[in-house]
Image (tube, rainbow, N blue to C red):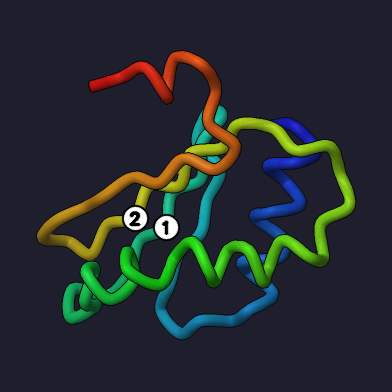
Amino acid sequence: MNAYQQKWVNVLRAANVKDWKIEARDNDITIEMPNITDLKLIRDNLPQTLAAISLDINLPHERLKFIFHNGHENFEYVLNPNEADLNEG
């Protein structure tokens, strides 16, 4: 796990969101949420939320994929995408 990824895990865990399990997996961060969690609401607000949280992170920015799952569905969000991410499609 790189320092940037570890800092994000620490910051997210410090938020103490009830019943969210936040783990590092390879170069990604997985976030398991209760099955009643509205992923659309999370997805719609994620860029602004991560931007606000990132103010506490003073490390060089690296590519980081967040994988959100609520037991029924999942979605991914890439922070600081690289060339390959931008050309996917």
Which element is circle 1 on?
strand
Q: The C terminus appears in which quarter of the rendering?
A: top left
Q: Give the answer, above or below, for where 12 lies relative to 41.
A: above
Q: Earlier in the sequence, mark 1 or mark 2?
A: 1
Q: Amino acid at mark 1?
A: Ile
Q: Is residue 88 left or right of residue 1?
A: left
Please tell me which residue lies in front, 43 or 19. Answer: 43
Residue labelled with disc 2? 68
Q: CA distance from mark 1 to mark 2?
A: 5 Å
Please tell me which residue lies in front, 10 or 88. Answer: 88
Q: Residue 73: horizontal and vertical position, in percent?
A: 14, 56
Q: Is residue 36 left or right of residue 47?
A: left
Question: Mark 1 near mark 2, Cβ–Cβ under 8 Å?
Answer: yes
Q: The N terminus appears in which quarter of the rendering?
A: top right
Residue labelled with disc 1? 31
Q: Amino acid at mark 2?
A: Phe
Q: Residue at x 68, y 42 (%)?
A: 5
